[in-house]
Amino acid sequence: MSKEKILLAYSGGLDTSIIIPWLKENYDCEVIAMAADLGQGDELEPVREKALKTGASKIYIEDLKEVFITDFIYPTLKANAIYEGKYLLGTSFARPIIAKRLVEIAALEGATAIAHGATGKGNDQVRFELTVKALAPHLKIIAPWRLWDIRSREDAIDYAKARNIPIPVTKKDNYSMDRNLWHLSHEGSDLEDPWNEPAYDRLLKLMIPPEKAPDQVEYVELEFEKGIPVAVNGSRPGPVALIEELNQIGGRNGIGIVDMVENRLVGMKSRGVYETPGGTILYAAHRELELLCLDRDTLHMKDQLSQRFAELVYFGQWFTPLREALSAFVDRTQETCTGMVRMKLYKGNCMPAGSKSDYSLYSEELSTFGADAVYNQKDAEGFINLFGLPLKVSALMREKNQNR
């Protein structure tokens, strides 16, 4: 009888490094690893050899960078979805694309279960598992952090050392990090005390601290088509290269540090530091274009729905009817979001420095403080009288009753 095949979401980090031997010690199984290339850079170089040496029968390394951008990052960017006003969702929308590919490979390999290294305290377990439930509800899910006796990252390090498994952290420097083309997150260690200021000189990998950025301003011009960024400074490099270029531009100017205490889906608060240099520039520029091109009612309704969109992404509900419906609404709003935005970068600050569009709703004739021939200021009196009529009636009622 053949062994059960378990497909593992593998990164080569601390958790997934020890899961391969743990699965083989606790299940009569063959472990197949899958690592998604979402732009981690050199982190993936030792992954193949490491997975095989620690017991995997084979490993898939899947280049998903462009699909990650076009099918997950851009829809979220167009929605202006930001979780709790700060987090640009870099880990959140990376999990559904990984889980989707896991489901596809599981079908190819005849695997009966999918395993992941997300902890029982975190959001990622939900994101992985909701995607599997939505796309392949027959698959079993194995979450070792909810099953094994390991209770801390220190325990995990000891487990790895006992089995001579190389790991990328030590007990002195054991931040939990997640990197992709969009961002790099840091959690744990000294960041667990919200009073501790992050040691940015040691922590940051994609950028430099704002105080060490150049003393001169740098401008960047971005062109959008229907809400999607297509050009940087006149060049059209393609989705992956575009974000890589913006990461370099933002990184050297100290753009995109977020230090926040956030509300996890499972109910607890956590503290994380996120580096999102290119994404921060894109969000700021896209917002300026929307302010230019969207009418007031559409913009304000979109702002309300953006928060809900962010929650759906953060909560792992990407493959849901509601998220798809909201994306359809967002796409309709973006039909006129085509134009150019110039951003001014200086020591961590990302400021608008100009925007233009053939679909602009801004009228200098209407807005000018100078003389104009298109707006009759006397019309405002009637408008205010009607707009304020409910207030006037309410005030008259109170006066009447006060005199009784």
Image (cartoon, rainbow, N blue to C red):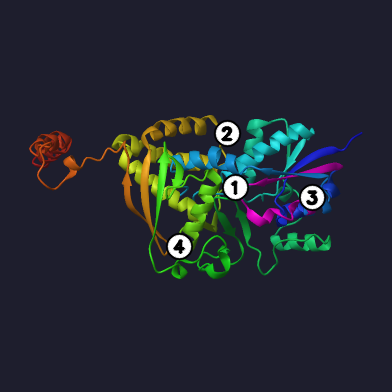
Q: Secondary structure under badge 3?
A: helix
In the rendered image, the quadrant that contains the N terminus is top right
Q: Nearer the viewer, mark 4 or mark 1?
A: 4
Residue at mark 4 to residue at mark 1: CA–CA distance: 31 Å
Q: Nearer the viewer, residue 82 or 156?
A: 82
Q: Nearer the viewer, residue 31 or 74?
A: 74
Sequence order check: which comes first, mark 4 or mark 1?
A: 1
Indicate the amino acid at tag 2.
Answer: Phe
The residue under label 1 is: 123
Q: Amino acid at mark 4?
A: Asn
Residue 189 in view, yes or no? yes
Secondary structure state at the residue bearing disc 2:
loop
Q: Residues within 10 Å of mark 2 (few under 14, many from 20)?
A: some
Amino acid type for the residue under numbered disc 1: Asn
- Using the image, tell me which numbered label, if any, was put on residue 108: none
Sequence-wise, the earlier of marks 4 and 2 is 4
User: In the figure, is residue 265 to the left or right of 368?
Assistant: right
Mark 4 or mark 3, which is nearer to you? Answer: 4
What span is in magenta? 28-49
Residue 321 on image: x %, y %: 53, 29
Q: Is residue 204 left or right of residue 20?
A: left
User: On screen, 34 above or below 112?
Assistant: below
Which comes before the other along the chain, label 4 or label 3?
3
Q: Reading the chain from its start, which is encountered first: label 2 or label 1? A: 1
Q: Which residue is mark 2?
A: 319
Q: Is residue 145 above or below residue 375?
A: below
Nearer to us: label 2 or label 1: 2
Say which residue appears at 65% left-offset and 37% top-offset: 100
Residue assigned mark 4: 253
CA distance for labels 4 and 2: 36 Å
